Image: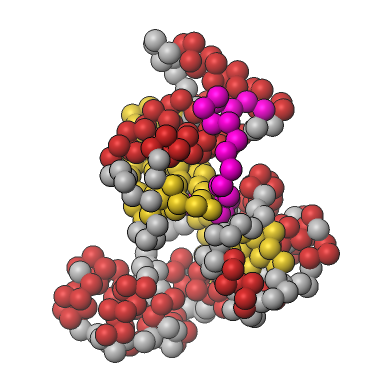
Amino acid sequence: MEQFAEPILHVDMDSFFVEVERLDDPSLIGKPVAVGGTGRRGVIASASYEARSFGVRSAMPVGEARRRCPGLIVVGSAHSRYGEVSRSVFEVMRSFTPIVEGISIDEAFLDVSGLRRHYTSVEDIGTAIRHTIRDQVGIPASVGIASTKFMAKLASKHAKPDGLFRVPTGTELAFLHPLEVAEMWGVGEATERTLHDLGVRTIGDLASVPFGLLERRVGSASARHLASLARAEDPRPVEGGTPTRSISSEGTFSVDIDDRDRIEREVLRMCDQVAARLAKAHVAGHTVTLKVRFSDFATITRSSRRKEAVSHTAEIWETAKELIDRAGIAGRAIRLLGISVGDLVDASAVRQLSFGHERRNAAAEAVDEVRERFGPGSVIPARIAPQPGIERTHPGDAS
C-alpha cells in the first residue's frame, strides 16, 4: 500500500480557553467572549471568533478589548480545568497514532504515516480526529495537513475555524509564497520590520532576496532558517512522547512592585503553584526559569539547569532565589513575574534518596498527598499567606 504523500497533521483547538468555558457555561455560546485577567491591568489570553471580529486578540489589554467590543464578556481563567480538557484531547489524538508531539496545551503535530492500512486518505484521518474530539470532548478543532511541520501549521491556520485544510505535495510554493512574511516561524516584530526595510512583504518576496543580503541584515542562522522555510524546506520529524515541555505559573501585578521581600514572596508562591502542578502530572524537571517583565515592558529570563530533577517547592525555590539574584532587579519596578520548570521527566523514575534531606523530602511528599486529597490550596508555605494585587494572566501550563 502506498505511503501518504502528506503524513503530517497539525491539530489546533479553536479558541481553546473560551471553548472550555463554554463547555461549563453553554450560555456563552455565540457571544463575544474572552478569557483573561479581569483586573485593571489584565490581558486577554483567548478570544472567541465573535470577539475577534471586533479586533480583540490575545495579549491585548482587557481595557482596550472592552473599548473595541463593548459587549465583551471577560471570564477569569480556570487553570486546572484547561489541563483536564487538554489531557482528554491528547488522549484522543494518541488513540489514532502514538507519534504525537505536543507544542502547547492546545496544539500538536501528528505523524499518521502508520495509518495507511486503516484509512484510504489522510483527509479521512483528519476528519475522524476532528469528529472524535468534538464527540468525546465537546470542543472544536482545526486540522492542517501537509508533507512538513511548517506547512501543516500554516494549513491549520487556514482551516480555522473548525475546519480542515490540506496542502497537496507539489503545491507548497504556490500556497506559501503569497502569504505575508509575518506568518513564518521566527519572524517577530523586529525581524518583520527589517524585512520590510528590504521591500519584503510576502514569503515569495523573501524567497527572492539574495542570501548574502539577508545574512547581513538578520545574521547567518536566521538567514538560513528563513531561506529554507521560504523554499518550503523543513526536514524536522514529528517527535512523539513530549506533550508538555514545561509547567509554569506567572502573574501580572495591578501595581508595579519593587520591594525585595514582596518579590520573593510572589516568586515563592509561584514555585509552590508549579510544585503542585508537577505533582499532579507526576513529573519533575531539570531546568528552572525565572521570567521578569519590568514596568517599561522589557522582559528577561534567567535559567538554571540542575543535575537532579526537582519537583517540590523547596527544591524549586532554592534555585529561584539564585535566579532572582542573577536577574539584576534591584530598584526596578516589576510588572510581571513567572516561574517555570522544564526538561520534564517521569517523577517516579528520577526520585532518589537525597542524603541529608530525608526529612524535607518526606515532608514534601506528605504535602503532595494532602493536596491530592484536599486540593492544591490545602497546604501552603507560611510566608505566602494570601496577598492582594496579583492576577494570573494566563494558565501557563505548557510551552
Give the magenta range. 378-399
What residue is shown at x 43% (from left), y 31% (from top)? 316
Q: Is residue 392 above or below residue 189?
A: above
Which color scheme did the rendering employ for the protein?
secondary structure
Which residue sits at x=51%, y=27%? 383
Q: Is residue 58 left or right of residue 323?
A: right
Which residue is at a point 31% across and 73% down the rendered structure image?
191
User: Would you say the magenta stretch is mainly helix, strand or loop?
Assistant: loop
The residue nearer to you, when weighing 248 against 154, is 248
Residue 25 visible in the picture: yes
**Residue at 53% over, 53% down:** 254
Q: In x, y percent, where is residue 136?
A: 77, 55
**As drawn, 214 above or below 129:** below
Q: Quadrant of residue 221?
A: bottom left
**In this orientation, which residue lies closer to the viewer: 180 or 324?**
324
In the displayed structure image, the side of residue 155 where residue 30 appears, left or right = right
Q: Position of residue 41 (x, y in %)?
A: 54, 59
The quadrant in which the N terminus is found is bottom right
